């Protein structure tokens, strides 16, 4: 009973915060919602159950980003952030195959010491890199435009208006990191005025252990999505920063209880990993779909939620029964009805060579022309409608 009670406490906190927020915003006439996302008992085993078509594309040979932490898309352009290995950001035009690499490591104007995150300013058509002490703007040709000192040690940032950003900083960082205030983890920052305002989300008092977070704060489909490692819910805000929805996961397994998360600091023994699942957010959104990632047992589990009929598929290793292709899907982006992943060519080649009778289709046609020196492969999956 103790574990069950502790698990419920997180959702209870969210519900209280949600109701409080809703009461304080009654004048807008909107009603916030709790949305349950049910996890199916069995993972999907065949790709054709939710995908109708697969396409393959080689990135340009000189693409500097190779260990991709985050991908975003704007029109024909894809933006690829490599935060640790090469500390660069690559912009690829999928139609013309033109390539721009932003490689400005240093301490001067327009240069960065680290890439903590990047965001696309859709109003100005800039890509903006979050450094430890500043936000740096470049145009889509890689030219430095401007930089602004940030008011705190933000860890993640998302542009949602011309000069307005949502920023995140986890509670469990060292106290030497500068914070706008001691209570919040989420803020709205106005780059022009310098104003910083707290955004209440209900999880401020949860001192969750910190592990590197990749895509836990994003602006997609005119909504701001936020979660954190080990948090069993996803918060959805509109462009006025009104909380519209809290999504939480339910299923045969429970989410890892809060007391065990704090006890083991994320380093869970095997028996707990088998008994519970936990959320490591990779938040992606389109009009009809929502995507994120979980850990269950010792496996990464992709979760794809169909908004139109509230159905869910989960998958890890999967049989590609469409063209016999690679059985893993390290998803980086969701755009309209397409999922995108990036895979190193040797993995496709090894999978291809494992067939005695080579499959017929796009995978074989594409992979038979790869070499060990080929650049990264962009794989696009067209999703079926629910």
Image (tube, rainbow, N blue to C red):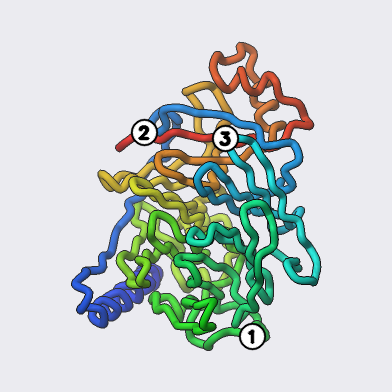
Query: Marks 1/3: CA distance?
Result: 47 Å
* Tag shown at residue 95: 3
Query: Marks 2/1: CA distance?
Result: 47 Å
- Determine the residue located farthest toward the top in the rendered image: 357
Q: Are marks 1 and 3 in contact (CB under 8 Å)?
A: no
Q: Are marks 3 and 2 in contact (CB under 8 Å)?
A: no
Mark 2 nearby-residue class (10 Å; few <14, some 14–19, many ≥20): some
Q: Is residue 192 above or below residue 357?
A: below
Q: Which residue is at 30% across, 37% downward?
A: 386
* Residue 267 visible (yes or no): no
Of residues 80 and 325, the one drawn nearer to the viewer in this rendering? 80
> Earlier along the polypeptide chain: callout 3 or callout 2?
3
Q: Are marks 2 and 1 in contact (CB under 8 Å)?
A: no
Tag 2 residue: 384
Say whether residue 344 is left or right of residue 316: right
* Relative image position of residue 365 (x, y in whole percent): 61, 18
Mark 1 or mark 3: which is in front? Answer: 3
> Earlier along the polypeptide chain: callout 1 or callout 3?
3
* Relative image position of residue 194 (x, y in whole percent): 54, 83
Label 3 sits on a secondary structure element that is loop
Q: Which residue is at 46% across, 52% downward?
A: 284
- Location of residue 383 (image quadrant): top left
Q: Is residue 356 above or below residue 129?
A: above
Say whether residue 313 is left or right of residue 316: left
Mark 3 nearby-residue class (10 Å; few <14, some 14–19, many ≥20): few
Mark 3 or mark 2: which is in front? Answer: 3
Tag 1 residue: 175
Label 1 sits on a secondary structure element that is loop
* Residue 340 visible (yes or no): yes
* Relative image position of residue 271 (x, y in whole percent): 53, 56
């Amino acid at each position: 009973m103790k574990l069950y009670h502790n698990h419920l406490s997180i959702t209870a906190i969210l519900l209280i915060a949600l109701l409080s927020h809703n009461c304080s915003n009654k004048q807008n006439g909107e009603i916030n919602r709790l949305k349950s996302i049910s996890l199916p008992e069995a993972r999907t085993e065949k790709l054709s159950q939710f995908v109708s078509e697969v396409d393959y594309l080689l990135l340009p040979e000189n693409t500097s980003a190779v260990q991709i932490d985050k991908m975003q898309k704007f029109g024909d352009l894809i933006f690829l952030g490599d935060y640790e290995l090469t500390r660069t950001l690559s912009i690829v035009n999928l139609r013309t195959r033109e390539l721009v690499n932003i490689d400005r490591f240093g301490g001067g104007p327009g240069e960065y010491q680290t890439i903590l995150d990047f965001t696309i300013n859709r109003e100005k058509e800039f890509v903006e890199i979050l450094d430890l002490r500043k936000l740096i703007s470049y145009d889509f040709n890689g030219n430095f435009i401007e930089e602004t000192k940030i008011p705190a040690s933000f860890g993640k940032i998302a542009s949602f208006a011309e000069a307005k950003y949502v920023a995140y900083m986890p509670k469990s960082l060292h106290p030497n990191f500068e914070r706008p205030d001691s209570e919040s983890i989420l803020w709205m920052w106005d780059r022009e005025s310098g104003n910083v305002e707290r955004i209440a989300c209900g999880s401020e008092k949860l001192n969750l252990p910190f592990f590197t977070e990749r895509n836990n704060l994003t602006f997609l489909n005119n909504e701001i999505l936020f979660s954190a490692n080990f948090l069993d819910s996803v918060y959805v805000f509109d462009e006025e920063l009104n909380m519209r929805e809290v999504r939480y996961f339910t299923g045969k397994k429970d989410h890892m209880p809060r007391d065990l998360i704090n006890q083991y600091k994320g380093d869970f023994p095997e028996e707990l990993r088998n008994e519970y699942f936990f959320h490591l957010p990779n938040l992606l959104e389109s009009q009809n779909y929502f995507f994120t990632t979980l850990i269950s047992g010792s496996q990464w589990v992709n979760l794809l939620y169909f908004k139109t009929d509230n159905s869910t598929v989960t998958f890890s290793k999967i049989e590609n029964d469409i063209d016999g292709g690679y059985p893993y899907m390290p998803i980086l982006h969701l755009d309209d009805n397409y999922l995108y992943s990036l895979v190193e060519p040797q993995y496709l080649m090894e999978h291809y060579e494992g067939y005695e009778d080579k499959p017929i289709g796009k995978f074989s046609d594409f992979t038979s022309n790869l070499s060990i020196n080929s650049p990264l492969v962009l794989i696009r999956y067209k999703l079926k409608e629910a």
